[in-house]
Image: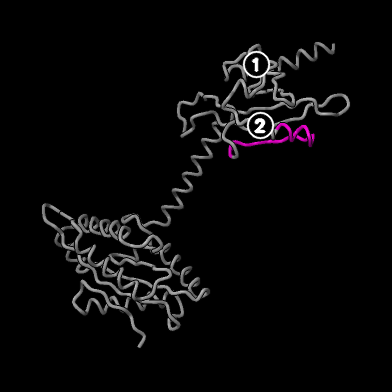
């Protein structure tokens, strides 16, 4: 009866849709079920009594040996998920749509097998195919990241939208207050943008805004934060920068926009901008006040004939 039960158990284990291996302390194979044979193209005869790393040179031998040894020493089972290590065995999967998965994703469990005295004599390793789950979770994570990214960006220009840009400004303002560091701000808008829309059409106006957004991202420092504040107005946050440094960048932006090559129906659309520069000081009690100061300087540029910049002064 005992032999019949043992044979029945062996039959069931051999046909489970999950890989089962039994290893001794030297990583020699003591058991190899049908799942492993089918996915590795190595039969029981091929593997029994041989060391697993010799059969599969691509295995992370050092990691595997440490994992198995831990089970022998602590006499407790261990687990590794596909998120920690995508796979132990480099098995191909049979999914027609891979979702970026070159090999079968696997969860692995390391289970101590004890003798009659309770000592661990071998370790059973289960290899579960979780490719479908991994692909689905990756797709969900990618979709979540894309949604989060799109919520920060302006749909037309691809730079930060007003909500996220102003959130960044509020954080930088608080940081400058806390650290006693300088913070500058540039606000600018396109000169006579309504005339561009009226003459060339709104599609051309949209292309102008896109071109401005692209060029703006190219001319600022890596640490600067650019955003579309609304309509044809843009903002640049300059951490660790005073008005003198911001003035240099403002002039660079002015020239870059003036040199933009935007063509519509064979005609070049001229673009110029007016800019205002402000620096966070004791008189600016909030980031909104700093925006107000930069806007005041911007309007001063407009009154001065446009295509220029002005710096907000407190005196």
Indicate which disc residue 198 carries: none
Residue 16 lies left or right of residue 100; in this view the side is right
Residue sitting at 29 percent across and 70 percent down?
Answer: 250
Residue 52 lies left or right of residue 211; in this view the side is right
Local packing at callout 2 (Cα closer than 10 Å; few below 14, some 14-19, many 20+) is: some
- Quarter of the image that includes the N terminus: top right
Q: Is residue 108 above or below residue 195?
A: above
| Residue 71 in magenta stretch | yes
Q: Which residues are magenta?
A: 68-83
* Residue 233 locus on image (x, y percent): 30, 67
The residue wearing badge 2 is 64
Dot 2 or dot 1: first in sequence order is 1
- Give the CA separation, mark 2 to mark 1: 17 Å
Q: How many marks?
A: 2
Secondary element at image label 2: helix
Corner quadrant of residue 256: bottom left
Local packing at callout 1 (Cα closer than 10 Å; few below 14, some 14-19, many 20+) is: some
The residue wearing badge 1 is 47
* Residue 59 locus on image (x, y percent): 59, 28
Q: Disc 2, disc 1: CB below 8 Å?
A: no
Residue sitting at 68 percent across and 31 percent down?
Answer: 65
Residue 189 lies left or right of residue 86; in this view the side is left
Closest to the observer, 38 or 65: 65
Corner quadrant of residue 184: bottom left
Residue sitting at 45 percent across and 65 percent down?
Answer: 168
In the displayed image of the protein, which residue is found farthest to the right? Answer: 117
Corner quadrant of residue 254: bottom left
Secondary element at image label 1: helix
Residue sitting at 48 percent across and 68 percent down?
Answer: 171
* Residue 111 locus on image (x, y percent): 74, 30
């Amino acid at each position: 009866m005992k032999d019949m039960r043992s044979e029945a158990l062996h039959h069931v284990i051999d046909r489970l849709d999950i890989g089962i291996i039994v290893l001794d302390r030297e990583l020699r194979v003591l058991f190899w079920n049908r799942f492993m044979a089918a996915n590795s193209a190595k039969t029981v005869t091929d593997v029994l009594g041989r060391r697993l790393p010799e059969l599969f040179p691509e295995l992370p031998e050092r990691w595997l040996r440490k994992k198995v040894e831990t089970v022998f020493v602590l006499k407790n089972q261990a687990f590794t998920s596909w998120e920690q290590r995508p796979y132990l065995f480099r098995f191909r999967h049979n999914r027609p749509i891979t979702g970026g998965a070159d090999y079968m994703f696997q969860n692995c469990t390391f289970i101590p097998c004890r003798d009659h005295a309770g000592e661990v004599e071998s370790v059973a390793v289960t290899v579960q195919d979780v490719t479908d789950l991994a692909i689905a979770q990756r797709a969900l994570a990618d979709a979540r990241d894309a949604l989060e990214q799109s919520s920060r960006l302006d749909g037309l220009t691809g730079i930060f939208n007003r909500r996220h840009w102003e959130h960044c400004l509020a954080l930088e303002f608080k940081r400058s207050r806390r650290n006693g560091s300088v913070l500058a701000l540039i606000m600018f808008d396109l000169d006579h943008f309504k005339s561009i829309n009226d003459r060339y059409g709104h599609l051309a106006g949209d292309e102008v805004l896109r071109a401005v957004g692209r060029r703006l991202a190219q001319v600022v420092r890596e640490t600067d934060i650019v955003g579309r504040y609304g309509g044809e107005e843009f903002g640049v946050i300059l951490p660790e920068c005073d008005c003198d440094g911001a003035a240099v960048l403002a002039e660079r932006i002015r020239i870059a926009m003036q040199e933009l090559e935007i063509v519509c129906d064979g005609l070049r659309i001229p673009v110029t901008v007016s800019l205002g520069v402000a620096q966070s000081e004791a008189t600016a009690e909030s980031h909104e006040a700093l925006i107000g100061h930069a806007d005041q300087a911007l309007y001063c540029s407009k009154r001065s004939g446009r295509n220029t910049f002005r710096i907000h002064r407190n005196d």
